Image (tube, rainbow, N blue to C red):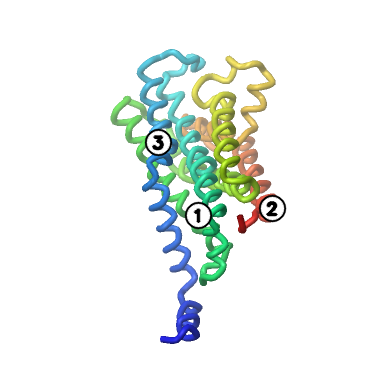
Amino acid sequence: MTATETTEVDRRTPRLRAVLAQAGMELRLLVRSGESLLVTLGIPLGVLVFFSLVDVLPTAGTDPVTFLVPGVLAISVVATGLVAVAIQTAFERKYAVLKRLGATPLTRGDFLVAKGLSVAGLLLVQAGVVLLVAALGLGWRAEGGWLLVPALVLLGALTATALGLLLAGTLRAEATIAVTNGLFLFLLLISGVTFDATALPDPLAVTGAYLPMGALGSALTSALAGDGFAVLPTLTLAAWGIAAVAVGARTFRWEP
């Protein structure tokens, strides 16, 4: 088969199949990385189990595991979408992987969709693991929200992944590691996902509530408590996602 014939065959490859194949590859890359699994699954589960059994954090009078489950789901989303994806993509850009994608039938837009699909798939599994550990191992029971939780996790995945790609496409790979890990720690401390935010000074508590991790945690808390759809936190999370996509589309650099 000649090069011309090969190109014609490649162009006839169904676009959806190409995107799904790339999404599968991206998912395998995330799962194969021990460091990524530690951040995306090990840390959230460790926080859930330890602080549910060792009652040392302020939880506003709420049972620790009931308080922690929504926050741990939010931590998982941000850890995967923001930290793991940003670092992985930054090094793909550094080593010209993204540049070489330009020579394949997969467009750059398709590549970003594949990234998002891989994160969404991984997070749905992670959310299931967190909920199973909480329910079977820690005696947790949800009051509701079984339809809202997957939708909120996917919205959070979109927002966190967009923010991760924004950082990966504008910073050097080494800077991406430092910034994403520092940002993750900052969000973890002020977003009220592991302890009651009223323990913080008011300016920090208010700021944390309007950042992606805090907004997602609040929306999930309302859903799982049976209080239904939390409008303001969900709109806040969506606004972050829209802003990240808009800015990232203008600033993302594919070449090293």
Residue 188, picture quadrant:
top right
Residue 229: % across, % down: 55, 38
Quadrant into which the C terminus falls: bottom right
Q: Which residue in the structure is indicated by mark 1? A: 115
Q: Which residue in the structure is indicated by mark 2? A: 251
Disc 3 residue type (three-letter): Leu
Q: CA distance from mark 3 to mark 2?
A: 30 Å
Disc 1 residue type (three-letter): Lys
For the point 54% across and 34% down, which residue is it?
181
Q: Earlier in the sequence, mark 3 or mark 2?
A: 3
Q: Earlier in the sequence, mark 1 or mark 3?
A: 3
Q: Are circles 2 and 1 on residues that touch, CB within 8 Å?
A: no
Q: Which residue in the structure is indicated by mark 3? A: 38
Disc 2 residue type (three-letter): Thr
Residue 165: % across, % down: 58, 49
Q: Nearer the viewer, residue 18 or 92?
A: 92
Residue 233, picture quadrant:
top right
Q: Compared to 179, does 97 lie above or below? A: below
